[in-house]
């Protein structure tokens, strides 16, 4: 996200909460054309209807910055109906709507490695800025992960794994010294040291993008090889793409499943 996009994000935030002064647009040295600002309801239907209006404008916009992700979904449907390709012909960005996640407690815990936390604080400076907070918006409660930590009775240990050229964290969840879940959802390999650490875990949740190899994700074959080394009681593939349908589970070994939205595990 470049500086202009961050500035526009602050403008959209102020617009959403009633401060209609386009100071962020001026800061980015942009000119605001009123007909390109469409006020709508925060749902898919509203995004669809207002995007149809935007697509009739001349010149047609090359990007749409939506007030939340549901508006963006409606915009995407309208763009497809118009026969346009996203992002080749028009880009769509949904500006996150996270207030509901922090409404009850007034904040939302955010756990991240030092590197990731720095990126979050930079990109979402408008949320992390405690000296001039955005009214009614999500207030992050940052927790930097530099080793194992506890949530209630559960010990959570970070598992550094490669994601292409990057290093990201998976997590091992333990309770009473029992390895309950190993969660490595975004990786291109699982180092031997991590395999040894999570060996014998009850449930392995692992990246398995598709059958074809990928530079930043495990393939189905690679994920099965890792699972065979770890020997969990059950394995669930996640971070799957459209190339791997739910029906593919029928050809997987016993105890290996494809995860799905709404899946709950009792441990």
Image (cartoon, grey):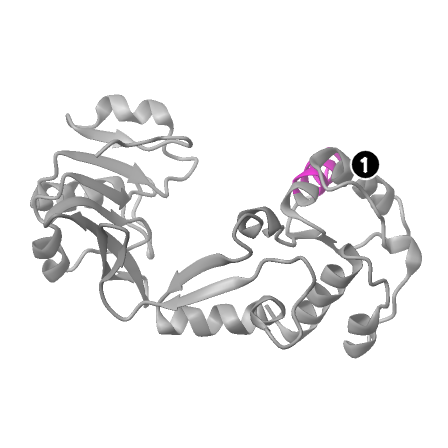
Would residue 59 be seen by someone viewing this image from the given angle?
no
Residue 53 percent coordinates (x, y): 87, 42
User: Which quadrant would the N terminus be assigned to in this image?
Assistant: bottom right
- Examine the residues drawn in magenta and state their main secondary structure: helix
Under circle 1, the secondary element is helix
Q: Residue at x 92, y 54 (%)?
A: 35
Residue 264 percent coordinates (x, y): 33, 31
Could you say which is closer to the camera, residue 33 or residue 169? 169
Q: Which range of residues does the magenta coloring cover?
A: 73-84
72 is higher (above) or lower (below) than 215: above
Residue highlighted by disc 1:
49
**Residue 252 vs residue 73: left or right?**
left
Q: Is residue 123 magenta?
A: no
Residue 234 percent coordinates (x, y): 17, 33
Could you say which is closer to the camera, residue 112 or residue 66? 112
Q: Residue at x 64, y 58 (%)?
A: 137
Could you say which is closer to the camera, residue 113 or residue 176? 176
Q: Is residue 75 magenta?
A: yes
**Residue 101 vs residue 21: left or right?**
left
């Amino acid at each position: 996200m470049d500086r202009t996009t961050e500035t526009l994000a602050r403008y959209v935030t102020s617009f959403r909460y009633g401060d209609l002064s386009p100071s962020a647009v001026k800061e980015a040295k942009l000119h605001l054309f009123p007909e390109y600002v469409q006020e709508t309801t925060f749902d898919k239907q509203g995004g669809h209807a207002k995007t149809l209006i935007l697509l009739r404008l001349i010149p047609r916009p090359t990007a749409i910055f939506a007030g939340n992700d549901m508006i963006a979904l409606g915009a995407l449907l309208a763009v497809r109906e118009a026969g346009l390709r996203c992002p080749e012909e028009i880009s769509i960005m949904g500006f996150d709507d996270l207030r509901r996640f922090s409404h009850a407690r007034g904040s939302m815990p955010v756990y991240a490695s030092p590197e990731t936390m720095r990126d979050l604080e930079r990109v979402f400076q408008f949320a992390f800025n405690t000296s001039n907070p955005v009214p009614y918006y999500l207030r992050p409660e940052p927790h930097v992960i530099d080793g194992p930590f506890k949530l209630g009775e559960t010990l959570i240990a970070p598992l550094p794994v490669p994601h292409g050229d990057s290093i990201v964290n998976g997590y091992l969840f333990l309770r009473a010294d029992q390895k309950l879940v190993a969660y490595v959802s975004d990786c291109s390999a699982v180092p031997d040291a991590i395999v040894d650490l999570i060996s014998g875990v009850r449930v392995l949740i692992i990246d398995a993008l598709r059958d074809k190899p990928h530079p930043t994700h495990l393939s189905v074959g690679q994920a099965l090889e890792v699972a065979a080394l770890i020997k969990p009681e059950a394995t669930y593939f996640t971070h799957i793409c459209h190339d791997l349908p739910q029906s593919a589970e029928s050809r997987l070994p016993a105890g290996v499943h494809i995860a799905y939205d709404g899946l709950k595990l009792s441990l």
